[in-house]
Amino acid sequence: MKRRVLIPLTAVGVLLTVTAPAGASESTGGWEPAPSPAWSYPAGARCDFAVQGSPVVDEVVQRTLATEEDGTKLVEYKGELVVRIVNSETGASYDADASGRAVVEIRPDRSQSWYVVGPILAGFGEGGGNVPRGLYTVDGAYTLEVSATGYKTLKLIHGTSDPLCSKVS
């Protein structure tokens, strides 16, 4: 038995309709924890200085909405996430809210399409996207395309991108 799932993303101009298998995890709606790992970047990779981040609040959950024959998955994420961004040289820190809700299409070649409402934390390397090198809180309604090579294209439909490197410099 399959169940139909409607995902209203009207803020980003999309209404996704997928058919997902019924069964296990019905009692939780298929949601399972999706912990966010700590990370670090050397000086120059995202900020002019070495920077690291780790979740201080992580209640993110995920559920797979559909899996196509070619291995493409449609995964939904939601939940509170606050990441502490730390300047590794000075210890200055900033707590960034990354509690947005997203539906992400993950393809076998590792490329991804994100359809997001609310804030997420996004990092861009030099020449690695259509946004200058840095760390950002992106908020609003937007899409984020990640190519198989890792190049990121951010398209704000309605929202803001707030640079974080300056908050911990």
Image (spheres, rainbow, N blue to C red):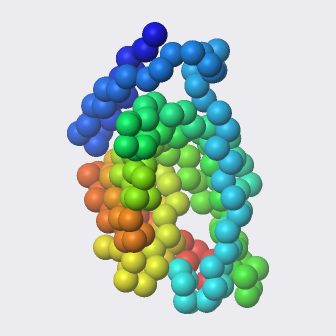
Q: Is residue 56 above or below residue 69?
A: below
Q: Position of residue 5 (x, y in %)?
A: 39, 21
Point out residue 37 in the picture as x, y percentages from the top left corner: 69, 58
Q: Residue furthest top?
A: 1
Name the residue at 34% across, 59% down.
Answer: 145
* Residue 116 visible here: no
In front: 142, or 110?
A: 110
Residue sitting nearer the eye, 129 or 25: 25
Q: Which residue lies most toward the left here?
A: 13
Q: How many marks?
A: 0
Position of residue 157 relative to residue 65, above or below, is below
Please name whichever residue, 105 or 71, is drawn nearer the observer in this view of the structure: 71
| Depicted 144 relative to depicted 50: above or below | above
x, y percent for residue 153: 32, 65
Quadrant in which residue 61 is drawn: top right
**Left-right relation of 57 to 150:** right
Residue occupying the point 50% across, 70% down: 123
Q: On screen, 4 above or below 45?
A: above
Instruction: Tell me where residue 154 sits by quadrant.
Output: bottom left
Quadrant of the snapshot with the C terminus: bottom right
| Residue 71 visible (yes or no) | yes
Q: Residue at x 42, y 53 (%)?
A: 108
Q: Nearer the viewer, residue 81 or 6?
A: 6
Where does residue 3 sit, x and y in percent of width and height? Answer: 42, 14
Residue 66 located left or right of residue 98: left
Give me the residue at 63% from left, 48% from top.
81
